[in-house]
Amino acid sequence: MANSKNTADEPSHPVFLNEIVEQLWPNINIAGSQMIKEIAEPMFKTMLPGPLKSLHFTKIDLGSVPLRLNGVLVSKTAHDGIKLDMNVDWDGECDIKLDADMMPEIGARHVKLRGRLSVLLGPLTNIIPLIGAAQIAFINPPLLELDFTGAANVADFSAIDDGIRSVILSIINSMFTLPNRFLLTLDTKNDYFKTYLPPLGVIRITVEKAWDFAEEAQGKAKKLFAKLTRAAPDTYAKVDVGAEPSWQTQTKDNTVNPSWNETHDFVVSDFHQCIKVHVFDKDVNSDDEIGMGLTTVEEVLHNGGRQELSLELKGEATGGKVSIACEYFKLTAASGGNSFTASTHKGAGRMSGVAAVLISGAYGIKGQREALTPSVEVTWGPEHSFQTAVKTDAPGTDINNPTFDQNFRIPIATDSGAENFRIALLNGEQEVGAVEVPFADVRDAPEMTLQDRFDVGGGTVVRASICLRGLGAADAQEIDLPRR
């Protein structure tokens, strides 16, 4: 059973949590199966090639073996909540069948899912149920394996396996992987603005150089690099931090000792987010992976902001290395926006701050219930546009006063200007009304946060919060976490 005195270096084995999951598994099976079908099938049409676009589920049964939880760490957050980190391990026998035009039926009988899950409970209240909401997210993209049967075991297995897994992982990452959190409201009176947990800071990663990956004296790994011994590769590095958008360096042609010294900023939501540096050989048909180096935000900061990462390929050591240098900044309102124009934050890929736009709901939308499909679109400048989920009329839904409870994050650069924030209410694809909020109004607001019921016209308002945060120096205590 979980221990309330548990600390970050004393993981517990939550017997009671696993018993709850086991009892709920039949319900999770039905609800999860329906969610997979409703979300995945439209994504098949847009993400898969050729005849795979017509893939659709004819059966989804997640089986009788529930997922297991272990290694639970419990801590108090700085924003009046409780944080539970735990390992999720699912090794289940499922029965999933898919069909497509001009293809035999495809099935999956076995699924493995592993990852580290973070559950935020808060804000805490003095009224039952004591917790306003639960937010669920994998700290890093989880590992997923599917054991296919039928046509997937013969022709085009790789395309089917990679394609379907890619869609499912895209769903998981877009909904359940940091910075994305799945929100489950427990108290109907919960205020989303108090529930939202802002990111921790920004890590500035410089990929310096890579070396030794073309040497042959590496045992089993040498066969993997036969291509590299015939001609020097054209190399680039691709960097991922959790499920943040990927970034890659320029390509260095015809060298086994590439030196990039290129920099990019990533927002940090959890210090245990992984930093993955993939080194590739650019090719005309398809790029070949040379190797991947792995660390975490926590690990590299504990090492003084510098690390040499060993490159591995398919679990095999290559002998190659890639070096990175990192600088961490906290997000703060204390600077009064000074970092937004600081020359130290100027340059390609660098941020000078972050804007968070929270959309709580819309009120007073006119029209017949059955004709309304409202959503809210947020734009900032020509490059940043976001849209909430589209709401439809359903039992228990007040479609004239819909709740969205979604947030969007906008990176601020020193050369991006001070564009107005634009909040527009849509019905389907048609704009109903909009309001522009000047950047200066938010910057000059108390704590650089502007919360209001913004009038978009016609008696309709959108309740939104816009919060600006600049970059500030982080002291050692703020990043001195116990090693996991």
Image: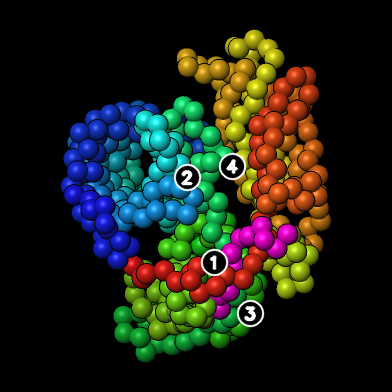
Magenta span includes 285: no
Kindly indicate the quadrant of the structure image that contains residue 484. Answer: bottom left
Q: Please give the residue where the numbered disc 3 appears in the rendered image.
A: 261
Q: Which of marks 4 and 1 is nearer the N terminus?
A: 1
Alpha carbons under labels 2 and 4: distance apart: 10 Å
Where disc 1 sits, the SS reads strand
Question: Would you say 93 lies left or right of 331 here?
Answer: left
Q: Which amino acid does label 2 sit on?
A: Arg
Q: What residue type is labelled 3?
A: Asn
Which residue is denoted by mark 1 in the rendering? Answer: 239
Q: Mark 2 points at which residue?
A: 181
C-beta proximity under 8 Å, tags 3 and 1: no
At label 1, counting other C-alpha atoms closer than 10 Å, the crowd grade (few under 14, some 14-19, many 20 or more) is many
Q: Which amino acid does label 1 sit on?
A: Val
Find disc 4 in the rendering and name its residue.
407
The span shown in magenta is: 325-336
Q: Which residue is drawn at 64% across and 13% down?
A: 371
**Residue 419 image offset from top left, x and y in percent:** 81, 49
